[in-house]
Amino acid sequence: MANPIIAPFPSTRLRRMRRTANLRAMISETDLSAANLIWPIFVTEVAGAEGEIPSMPGVERLTLDGAKRAAERAARLSIPAICIFPHSDQELRTETCERAWDPDNIGNRAIRAIKEAVPELAVMTDIALDPYNINGHDGFVVDGEILNDETVEALVKMALAQAEAGADILGPSDMMDGRIGALRAALELEGHKDVAILSYAAKFASAFYGPFRDAVGASGRLVGDKKTYQINPGNRQEALRCVARDLAEGADMVMVKPGMPYLDICREVKDRFAAPTFAYQVSGEYAMLEGAIRNGWLSRDAMLESLLAFRRAGCDGVLSYFAPAVAEMLA
Ligand SMILES: NCc1[nH]cc(CCC(=O)O)c1CC(=O)O
């Protein structure tokens, strides 16, 4: 970092450059635009499950038609990418999770519908077994253990189905070891060399995912917790090793998740690896901010400030449920 030279007061008065809006604009260090946003949406195949998610006020589960309209809205607002999270038929969850790689599962149908409606919009997916798993885990569970290598094989099948459906960016969120390398190799082999991987590389075992699990119908299902695969929230060095490992295995971009409580990790990842770096402002962060805004306890500027903070911390972009609202404010 540069060594700023500060003349003694009153020669230096830092308030001189804060006096008017134009002076402030001239020395503004960080910007936020719609191009920095990825919009996560929930798509359901269950009749009657569409509509607002109680723990995420303002966020809805969408039908396929709703997903198409969201894609059109994203394009109008210059949001470059949308990320699809499936809410699948709860009755069809199984221990063997075969619907995860069914070309006609709701996630894959949503990819096709959106690519058809708005071909230029980048479509990102989630790779993990939890939307289709009877016990809500991201991997196969046998005798209470989350199996790593068997899960990776399933994730590869899931990824190929998504790539086949037209996904531009795959987002493995499962935290199994070795999955990035396995996905990259399979994509090369199966003719999907240009499909990008945005790895959920530094994903912590967080209490902030609660509302998301409500949204995808996993809350009541989850047996135990995800601490045998997601990172201990206190572990900075382990998070950096995960990022290094995923980049070495062929990830194009990396993610830190959750976001606001982990801005130190964002900064460190960007400085160390100089790779495209994203953060996920997760459901619990959204719920806190939106809840306070709806109660009149915070102004909507808190939303903008929270996203600007990710940019200041070195992130190229942010997955945020605020994406459309913020893009509208910025337009
Ligand atoms: N594969 C699961 C997944 N993918 C994205 C999120 C959380 C996103 C959010 O909270 O907004 C989760 C939840 C979890 O790990 O239990």
Image (tube, helix red, strand yellow):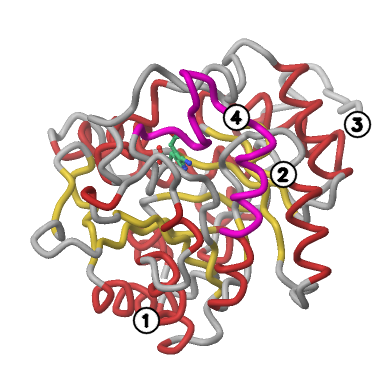
Looking at the rendered structure, the kind of residue marked 1 is Glu
**Left or right of residue 120, residue 46 in this image:** left
Looking at the rendered structure, the kind of residue marked 3 is Ala
The answer to which of marks 1 and 3 sits earlier in the sequence is 3
For label 1, the residue is: 72
Q: How many numbered discs, if any?
A: 4
Instruction: Give the magenta-colored segment's residue range.
Output: 135-158
Helix, strand or loop under label 1: helix
Helix, strand or loop under label 4: loop
Between the residue at mark 3 and the residue at mark 4, the CA separation in whole angstroms equals 48 Å
Ligand 1 within 8 Å of disc 4? The answer is no
Judging depth in this view, the residue of 181 and 96 nearest the camera is 96
Q: Is residue 32 visible?
A: yes
| Residue at the (24%, 65%) spot, across then down | 45
Helix, strand or loop under label 2: helix
The answer to which of marks 1 and 4 sits earlier in the sequence is 1
For label 2, the residue is: 179
Q: Give coordinates of residue 282: x percent, y percent.
A: 43, 38
Mark carried by residue 40: none
**Left or right of residue 134, residue 46 in this image:** left
